[in-house]
């Protein structure tokens, strides 16, 4: 806190729609009287030793404040350009990425009961960038897992679970195949679990977490038709067994006779199984599973995220710069706003977080003032004004 009793937080408005959605967050925060002073910095890349880099002033601001809210950044395409997101991640050792995905009342998707929290190890695994060509036509990409990185990520997962009142941590892995690397990640999670006796720990294989285990067999069960019969089961947290059958080969049948049996059911059929746990996993799995979870609540436009680091923590919307609608006052600021609310909880400013959250969710649930991506006709400015009206 500074001399005025306010917290100083770095704001990186970003590119494309970034400045528009950042402006909304600033307006709403100021109307809600959140004790934050924004230190706005520009991260337009500069050339340093022939490479694109983040300006020193921006780095210095995040280092000083240890907290930042970040809009989307356009990733330059082409050789010699380093992704600024990756640079930020490396510069501040942002070791864990937190992605909560909760269904938003009023925004209809096939799922109404999503409430997942996923923590992704953010610094190593498959994304260590250690790749080389052994001989022509043979390449090697090394997946690096260390006890140190696994431990700090696991410890954060347990700490987060206790902070948000979840009573379980679930490690997601493939230690059955990658016995050493994922094995180390899993062992480390088990060790860390002992430090948190009030939180349960379990683990699940990645494929089972998202797709059930399936045992399939083909059979000419029904005359000339080939059927695919699959018995599938998943065990998180209870055991569920589904049996389904679908025609595999129906070419000889006229279309009217084609059978429409239910599509094979997957874990995404009932995301509520994950509502009491915090999932923690290595980098690549987290990348994929977190986007899948975002898909369950209606896409990246509504998904916040936090990058927790040793030197600083950076909160950001998951979507990109939306160049197709930039500058037209059409952008939906919800994801950045929800990220800013996550940041408030990280700062333990719970009352302000709750106040702004109920105003956002209330506006969406009411359904009268929505931006185009949510099926409405309102501008970002009108949506922002409606949220401000609902603040207490
Ligand atoms: P995008 O997320 O920018 O856009 C995908 C679609 O979603 C577009 O139709 C867009 O209009 C819409 N959309 C996204 N956010 C929206 C919002 N808040 N409100 C309303 N509609 C929204 O993805 P893209 O087009 O693949 O990427 C564009 C640029 O963003 C690229 O340069 C990419 O590298 C960058 N990017 C940055 C980040 C980041 O900084 N974290 C993440 C993803 C992509």
Image: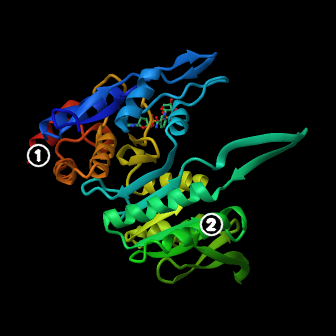
Q: Is residue 298 left or right of residue 348?
A: right
Residue 29's spot in the image, x, y percent? 19, 38
Q: Is residue 65 in sight in this rendering?
A: yes
Residue sitting nearer the eye, 154 or 254: 154
Label drawn at residue 59: none
Q: Quadrant of the N terminus?
A: top left
Residue 379 sits above or below residue 195 on the image = above
Name the residue located 52 percent from the left edge and 42 percent from the top edge: 93
Confirm or reject: label 2 Cβ below 8 Å from ligand 1.
Answer: no
Label drawn at residue 390: 1
Q: In the structure shown, which secondary structural element does the residue marked by tag 1 occupy?
A: loop
Name the residue located 31 percent from the left edge and 24 percent from the top edge: 328
Name the residue located 63 percent from the left edge and 16 percent from the top edge: 49
Residue 235 sits above or below residue 265 on the image = below
Q: In the structure shown, which secondary structural element does the residue marked by tag 2 occupy?
A: loop
Residue sitting nearer the eye, 221 or 254: 221
Q: Quadrant of ligand 1?
A: top left
Tell me which numbered mark, 1 or 2, is placed earlier along the sequence. Answer: 2
């Amino acid at each position: 806190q500074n001399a005025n009793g306010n917290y100083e937080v770095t704001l990186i408005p970003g590119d494309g729609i970034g400045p528009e959605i950042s402006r909304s967050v600033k307006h709403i925060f100021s109307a809600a009287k959140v004790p934050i002073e924004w230190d706005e910095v520009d991260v337009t890349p500069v050339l340093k030793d022939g490479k694109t880099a983040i300006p020193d002033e921006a780095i210095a601001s995040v280092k000083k404040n240890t907290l930042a809210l970040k809009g989307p950044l356009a990733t330059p395409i082409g050789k010699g350009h380093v992704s600024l997101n990756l640079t930020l991640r490396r510069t501040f050792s942002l070791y864990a990425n937190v992605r909560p995905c909760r269904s938003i009342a009023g925004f209809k998707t096939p799922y109404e009961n999503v409430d997942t929290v996923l923590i992704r190890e953010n610094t190593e695994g498959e994304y260590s960038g250690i790749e080389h060509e052994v001989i022509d036509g043979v390449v090697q990409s090394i997946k690096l897992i260390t006890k140190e990185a696994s431990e700090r990520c696991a410890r954060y997962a347990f700490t987060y679970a206790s902070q948000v009142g979840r009573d379980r941590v679930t490690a997601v892995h493939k230690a059955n195949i990658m016995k050493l690397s994922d094995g180390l990640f899993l062992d480390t999670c088990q060790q860390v679990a002992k430090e948190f006796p009030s939180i349960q720990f379990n683990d699940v294989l990645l494929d089972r977490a998202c797709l059930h285990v399936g045992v399939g067999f083909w059979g000419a069960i029904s005359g000339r038709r080939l059927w695919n019969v699959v018995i599938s089961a998943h065990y998180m947290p209870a055991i569920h067994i589904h049996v389904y059958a679908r025609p595999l080969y129906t070419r000889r049948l006229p279309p009217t006779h084609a059978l429409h049996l239910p599509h094979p059911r997957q874990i995404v059929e009932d995301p509520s199984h994950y509502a009491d746990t915090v999932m923690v996993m290595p980098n690549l799995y987290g990348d994929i599973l977190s986007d899948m979870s975002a898909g369950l609540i209606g896409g990246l436009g509504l998904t916040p995220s936090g990058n927790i680091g040793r030197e600083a923590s950076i909160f950001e919307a998951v979507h990109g710069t939306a160049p197709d609608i930039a500058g037209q006052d059409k952008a939906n600021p919800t994801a950045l706003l929800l990220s800013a609310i996550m940041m408030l909880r990280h700062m333990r400013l719970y009352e302000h977080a709750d106040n702004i959250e109920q105003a956002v969710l209330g506006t969406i649930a009411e359904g009268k003032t929505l931006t185009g991506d949510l099926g409405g006709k309102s501008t970002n400015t009108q949506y922002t004004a409606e949220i401000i009206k609902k603040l207490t």
